[in-house]
Image: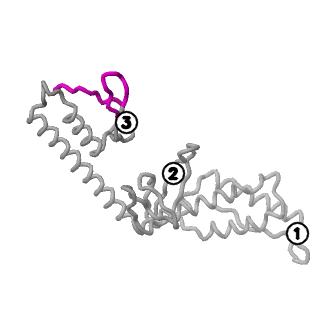
Amino acid sequence: MAIIQQVEDGKLVDQTGSATSSKTTAKAGGELDKEAFLQLLVAQMQYQDPLEPTDNTEYISQLATFSQLEETQNLNQTMTEDAAYNLVGKQVIMKVTNSQTGETSYASGMVDYVLRQNGGVYLSINDSLYSIEDLDTVADGDYYTASILAKTFSDEVAALPSVDQLTLSDEAKLSELGSVYSNMTDYQKGFLSEDTVNRFNELVNKMAELRKEHPVEGSGDESEEPTEEVE
């Protein structure tokens, strides 16, 4: 099959080298969608060499290819939507990349509903919409609660001063974290790193030493520990 005009970078190029803009579009990575495929087929029919017209059998073959492409894309869209609907009520973690800065951030929560908009599928999480393409993790309720609790506990421990800089003003925070840890299940504690637990115990022991050096006035006791060492 001979074609008078070439199709290059989504544009029809004439014999003189000037380019005419085309509505043909391509997806990222050079993959043509069904609209682009159909436009290319029409361009071939419109600009074919009248001295060497395209054989009807070849057109039928190309139309069959187009039909297969359309069915495949429709099937993929249906599967994507079904997967999104199955996420409603589940806890998920979304990995979002800023298109301008390239920075990656994470958002987590329960999927409230699914929205189809402008050909895309979006998940509503904490009153914000996220593309299903940004889905990173799907977790059951126990796993999600344990991971979030462990991360919060670890961040709070990391935010405390070092052992050498610890003061009595940090006693209330240590006591609060001790209560959080004691209320965690063995499954939830398993999400804590050994470094986090060791650092917390070091801080607890240091606070006990500080309290012995500065006993509470009128308590009648020489010392008062804010919390017990955790295992």
Which sits in the foreground, 209 or 19? 19
Which sits in the foreground, 20 or 175? 20
**Callout 3: few (<14), some (14-19), or many (20+) C-alpha neighbours within 10 Å?**
few
Label 1, label 2: how far apart the Cα atoms are = 50 Å
Q: Which residues are magenta?
A: 1-19
> Residue 174: image x %, image y %?
73, 64
Q: Earlier in the sequence, mark 3 or mark 1?
A: 3
Q: Residue at x 18, y 25 (%)?
A: 2
| Label 3 secondary element | loop
Is label 1 or label 2 in front?
A: 2
> Residue 217: image x %, image y %?
91, 74
Label 3, label 1: how far apart the Cα atoms are = 82 Å
**Callout 1: few (<14), some (14-19), or many (20+) C-alpha neighbours within 10 Å?**
some
> Residue 53: image x %, image y %?
12, 29
User: In the image, 37: left or right of 160?
Assistant: left
Residue type for callout 1: Pro
Residue type for callout 2: Val
Q: Which residue is mark 2?
A: 96
Q: Which residue is mark 3?
A: 21
Q: Which residue is mark 1?
A: 215
Q: Quadrant of residue 15?
A: top left
Q: Earlier in the sequence, mark 3 or mark 2?
A: 3
